[in-house]
DNA sequence: CCCGTTAATTATCTTTTGTTAACCGCCCCG
DNA sequence: CGGGGCGGTTAACAAAAGATAATTAACGGG
């Protein structure tokens, strides 16, 4: 049952994957459930772990010298989460990643997956495509900061993923958008009065 | 002389490249010089061209319905430039890319390079690494929008690439930072008075 | 050498956001 | 059932940014 989920995951992720690689991957993949608030990667850790989110949501946030928390990234079901400090920059994470809800993940060591799938064409392809997708998403977010107002960014965010409103406190959405919770509250008010007028 | 430059470029870019692939690549690569203001990719084009900038600078900008120009990206010597709409999203470019200075580039069709280098392990590796770098850069820029004030972003930008001040009009830097030229002018003034006080 | 163009600064006013703190509602836990 | 804590809203004020326009500075071409 559990291994079936992992098998489906890998088959799906790497179409054309050499079946011989499967057992190694599966035994290296841990299924875990994070309780709300439980930490996936802590600031300062150098943890090249990669996780596929089956269900739930993980928030990546930064704490500055004054103790102010800023949400940098939100990831949810069917997405992959990892510390980009560790994996891209080989440095300790400047952020903490924790579950906002009860979150079920498939977890694997990034270096291990690289080893196991070295020279596997299906993997090369999938890995490349995956990073391309991440890049496209990132560029889109950069665009939103350059081209849109905070209000527009907010409307776009809830249009793209409406259940964020139910699942994530507004204060996290605010800092994700680059504004303060107070400001987001005012924006919400402005939107309502615009709509009902 | 010209082919030597191209050879050096490819050898450098794809360490371990199969030499047999070189002639095809070289003949597919065009060396071009863009005059200041000359357009590399025009809004609406679906042009999967990729260029390596030998010398000079290319600006990617967006024009909204009111005719307001916003700089989305600046790329300079030793960097690669392409329309991400065309290459990542297979759609016509929403942006125009043009040279700010006399700019010398090596230009090649993205699909062609993919064909020529299919199944070339050195290429897979280089391509992956390249996209990873782009992703790291993008994430860093997102961070700057979420974690920094416009003033901090400006100081960071000129610290990272000081000659932008001489090479790029402030108004382009302003919109790149997500603010208006007037606002950047005020920020510059604030910085000076802080410093001389 | 002056004119025209463009960029940058400055001024004025409006709007938005940040900051801080008060307040309210809600939920949980003792 | 009564605090406490937390999230969201609101208020009040300060700071910053946007919009618009006028002014100044820089520069190249006739």
Image: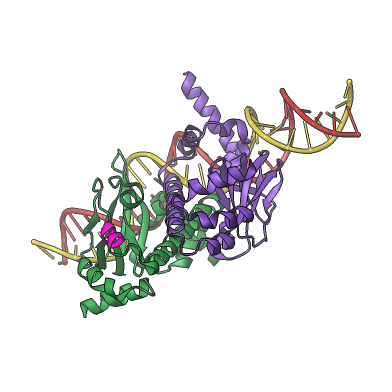
Chain colours: A purple, B green, C red, D yellow
Q: Quadrant of residue A183?
A: top right
Q: Quadrant of residue A58?
A: top right
Q: How many marks?
A: 0
Which residue is drawn at the image coordinates 23% and 69% (left, top)?
B24
Give the residue at the far front of this rendering: A20
Q: Quadrant of residue B170?
A: bottom left
- The rendered magenta stretch, by its main secondary structure, is classed as helix
The answer to whether residue B151 is seen in the rendering is: no
Q: Position of residue C2 (x, y in %)?
A: 16, 60
* Residue extent of the magenta highlight: B109-115
Is residue A68 placed above or below B127 in the rendered structure?
above
Is residue B101 placed above or below A160 in the rendered structure?
below
Q: Nearer the viewer, residue B172 or B72?
A: B72
Which residue is drawn at the image coordinates 71% and 46% (left, top)?
A38
* Residue B113 part of the magenta-drawn span: yes
The N terminus of chain B is located in which quarter? bottom left
Q: Nearer the viewer, residue A76 or B33?
A: A76
> From the viewer's perspective, is B2 left or right of B166?
left
Q: Position of residue B154 (x, y in %)?
A: 47, 59
The C terminus of chain B is located in which quarter? bottom right
Is residue A101 placed above or below A21 in the rendered structure?
above
> From the viewer's perspective, is A128 left or right of B109?
right
* Residue A163 part of the magenta-drawn span: no
Give the residue at the far top of this rendering: A197
The answer to whether residue A56 is seen in the rendering is: yes
Which residue is drawn at the image coordinates 58% and 32% (left, top)?
A165
Q: Position of residue B34 (x, y in %)?
A: 21, 64
Q: Position of residue A146 (x, y in %)?
A: 42, 47
């Amino acid at each position: 049952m559990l291994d079936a989920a992992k098998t489906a995951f890998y088959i799906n992720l790497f179409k054309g994957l050499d079946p011989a690689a499967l057992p190694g991957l599966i035994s290296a993949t841990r299924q875990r459930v994070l309780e709300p608030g439980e930490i996936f990667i802590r600031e300062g850790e150098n943890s090249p772990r990669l996780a596929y989110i089956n269900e739930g949501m993980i928030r990546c946030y930064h704490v500055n010298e004054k103790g102010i928390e800023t949400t940098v990234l939100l990831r949810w079901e069917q997405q992959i989460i990892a510390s980009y400090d560790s994996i891209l920059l080989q440095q300790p994470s400047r952020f903490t990643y924790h579950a906002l809800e009860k979150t079920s993940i498939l977890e694997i060591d990034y270096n291990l997956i690289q080893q196991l799938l070295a020279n596997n064409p299906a993997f090369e392809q999938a890995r490349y495509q995956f990073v391309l997708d991440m890049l496209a998403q990132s560029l889109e977010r950069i665009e939103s900061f350059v081209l849109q107002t905070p209000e527009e960014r907010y409307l776009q965010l809830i249009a793209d993923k409406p259940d964020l409103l139910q699942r994530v406190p507004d204060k996290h959405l605010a800092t994700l958008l680059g504004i303060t919770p107070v400001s987001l509250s005012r924006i919400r008010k402005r939107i309502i009065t615009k709509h009902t007028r």
